[in-house]
Image (cartoon, grey):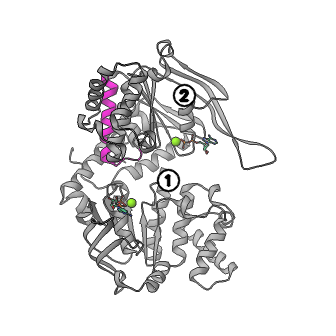
Amino acid sequence: MLLELKDITKSFAKDDSWFFKRYQDVLKGVSLSLNKGECIGIVGESGSGKSTLGKVILGLETQDSGSVTFSNEISQLPRHKAVSVVFQDYNTSVNPRLNIAQIIAEPLINEGLEKSQLKAQISKLLIEVGLEDSMRARYPHQLSGGQLQRVCIARAIAANPRFILLDEAVSSLDVSIQVQILDLLLELKQSRNIAYLFITHDIAVASYLCDRLMFFKDGKIVEQVNDIAALPLVTNEYTKNLLNAASYLEIPFDINDVDK
Amino acid sequence: MLEVRELNVSVATGNTQSHLVSDVSFTLKEDQCLGILGESGSGKSVSCSAINGLLGEQFSVSGQAIFDGENLLTMPSKQRQDMRGQQIAMIMQSPMTAFNPLFTIGNQAVETIKQHQPHSTPDAKKLFCEILSKVNLKNPQYLLSKYPHELSGGMLQRIMVALALVLKPKLIIADEPTTAIDYISQREVINELQMVRERFGTSIIFVSHDLSLVSHIADSVLVMHQGKMVDYGSTQQVFNAPSSQHTRYLIDTRLKLINRFKHVMGGV
Ligand SMILES: Nc1ncnc2c1ncn2[C@@H]1O[C@H](COP(=O)(O)OP(=O)(O)O)[C@@H](O)[C@H]1O
Ligand SMILES: Nc1ncnc2c1ncn2[C@@H]1O[C@H](COP(=O)(O)OP(=O)(O)O)[C@@H](O)[C@H]1O
Ligand SMILES: [Mg+2]
Ligand SMILES: [Mg+2]
């Protein structure tokens, strides 16, 4: 086991009332465990608390109760080496004044890599995420969304983490680019044995990438699917409703599938 | 009803002129839905804004957009503005920014209606409640009393559609209307638009990067790529026998993405 969450709760003060404080419970007791090299999808609609859960795992927010435990192997490492993150908004996740090489170099420098090795390591990472070495001198605004998200992934794997949290990491990309990025994530998972927690509202994307799915609603896991093949057998009303809507919308009807 | 011929749009940035849209042509009949499909930056929004006269001074637009016998692109701006309120309605991607957060939904709807039609406030309210019921929104009075932040994005988008309907437009241009909302509400908005066509005979231009959504709602499809129209025909024809490589590519990547989901769900 790599990561274990036990009964995480979190509430935020609502600032809509000036005479007494009201709280909104955003996480209402979330437990899950993630194994080495595994990919779990957290699937839920917007506002359900997915990003907050991600932030608690990363230590960017503190839970009110419950525990986040990383395996021994990981907790001995410095945080930046063990755990990494890729967000949806690639534009605000990078410093626009740094060039691509500098962006990717950040975690490597943190790790104490010698300057002489830096250049070669950056080239290796760029190639690993499917970018040309010649992109190193460019700035973020000179890249497309898909290219920039690749840079974020290169940075995320730079320190060779065991675990990457991906929060809607492909949601603002065109479908064709989504497929490329998901394939890259699958490759990296294989080659580097990285575990992912993949947060998304998109059930098709989650099914593409993940081994297991947790359906998230109102701050709780309402249903867990351990085998994607068992998706049609879900029993929770909300999950059923979501899958129905998704099947209806996702699957284009009447299009000849050339593979068949 | 709407015939667009060789629509071209370019924009002046500094002293260079860049071409954003080239030679887009299509015909839209009454109560039909045209889907405009393309990846981001392909020129979908620019084309729609050009047709609807919403582009700023720095853009130059040529070609024709004949709406009920008149060319929208050469119409005097006053007439065009009236046209835009009364006959052509636009629904945008982000429902949250379309409403003013400081006023109730009812307040804003009444104001909008009164801008275009000589109604008293109670009459305008009544009219809007009727439309809300017609598009199957339950409890209209309750909705009218809400502020935008008290409703979900999906609900706001459905209210936008209803508000667009009040003026009985002949054409609704919906630019990525469901991109910012969740599946369950997406399905509701799509169903609502379907119903609008059937009940009110409204024509729809449905803009999306999402091939599945377009295949669900459109009778004909126009595919854009880098500012050009690369495919155009009936939905059947475009998706089953695409004439352009790019359309094929959009279909193939989409099928690849949903393949596992589709497979386990049994291709519903
Ligand atoms: N820092 C914060 N302060 C107050 N409320 C917050 C904060 N972060 C998130 N929330 C609220 O928590 C709820 C869940 O948000 P989020 O975790 O971002 O959901 P999701 O990622 O599933 O869309 C939302 O209602 C949001 O407004
Ligand atoms: N105000 C503007 N000035 C210059 N270029 C613009 C402007 N608005 C849009 N563009 C460009 O026009 C192209 C088409 O944009 P748009 O129609 O918004 O694409 P989409 O298909 O995603 O709706 C893009 O390359 C975009 O960068
Ligand atoms: Mg989120
Ligand atoms: Mg657009």
Kindly state the secondary structure of the residue where label 1 is placed: loop
Name the residue at 65% across, 69% down: B106
Kindly state the secondary structure of the residue where label 2 is placed: helix
A37 is higher (above) or lower (below) than B115: above
Question: How many marks on residues?
Answer: 2
Circle 1 residue: B181
Name the spot of residue B38 as percent of width and height, x first.
Answer: 31, 58
Circle 2 residue: A57
A207 is higher (above) or lower (below) than B204: above
Name the residue at 26% across, 35% down: A130
**Marks 1/2: CA distance?**
26 Å
- The reply, left or right, for residue B241 in relation to residue A213 is left
The main secondary structure of the magenta stretch is helix
Residue B217 appearing in the image: no
Find residue B68 and report its image quarter.
bottom left
Q: Nearer the viewer, residue B45 or A105?
A: A105
- The reply, left or right, for residue A223 in relation to residue B103 is left
